Amino acid sequence: MGNTKNIIIATLIAIILLMAVGYSAFATQLTINGTAQIIGEWNVKITNIQIQNISEGCNGGTPEYTNTTATLNGELIKPGDSITYEITIQNAGTIDAKLSKIKLTADDINGSPALKYTNTEPATNLAAGEQTTFTITVQYDADTTEVPEIKTKTITGIIEYVQK
């Protein structure tokens, strides 16, 4: 009986070893390698500034701009005079953009109260490759009856586009 027991144990061990070898033969290890790459480009920028309307005798200056800044420096002569600048913004990238914020502020504390400005807004959505324009009009207040002591006013602003 002891011999039979040993034969059964040896047979079971042999079967377990055979199963382990069989499992190894049919098991496959898979290796996955991959690379992700961002190919989108963000490039919303100012591409042009044109003087659209200018009162006779006034000087619109030479508008200057970079991709992200614009400088306008007009000279008005008399009440009622105005200059309108048209600013072009282009989405030269591959990612659609949407207008997040537009805030133009005049320095009314240190600037002339006789100088007023108005503006239109650029497009809310700017798809890749599209462009939009908006205007800023600076006006010498027509109701001014005296030449003001302070003759300049600074307008600063932010136009912010974000990923759509």
Image (cartoon, rainbow, N blue to C red):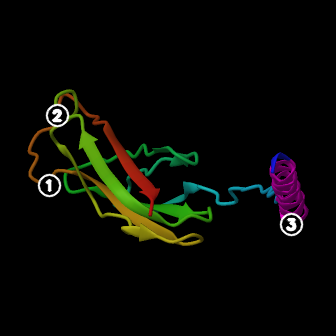
The rendered magenta stretch, by its main secondary structure, is classed as: helix
Question: Looking at this view, is 53 or 123 the one in front?
Answer: 123
Q: Earlier in the sequence, mark 3 or mark 2?
A: 3
Badge 3 density bin: few <14, some 14–19, many ≥20, Cα 10 Å: few
User: Secondary structure under badge 3?
Assistant: helix
Q: Earlier in the sequence, mark 1 or mark 2?
A: 1
Would residue 53 be seen by someone viewing this image from the given angle?
no
Task: Report the residue marked by disc 3.
Answer: 26
**Residue 85, percent from left and from top:** 41, 58
Quarter of the image for residue 39 reads bottom right
Measured Cα–Cα span from mark 1 to mark 2:
13 Å
The amino acid at mark 3 is: Phe
**Residue 117, percent from left and from top:** 24, 52
Question: Looking at this view, is 23 or 91 the one in front?
Answer: 23
**Residue 99, percent from left and from top:** 37, 60
Q: Residue at x 55, y 54 (%)?
A: 45
Instruction: Indicate which disc residue 142 carries.
Output: 1
Task: Report the residue marked by disc 2.
Answer: 148
The amino acid at mark 1 is: Ala
Q: As drawn, is 58 to the left or to the right of 35?
A: left
Badge 1 density bin: few <14, some 14–19, many ≥20, Cα 10 Å: some
Q: Which residues are magenta?
A: 3-29
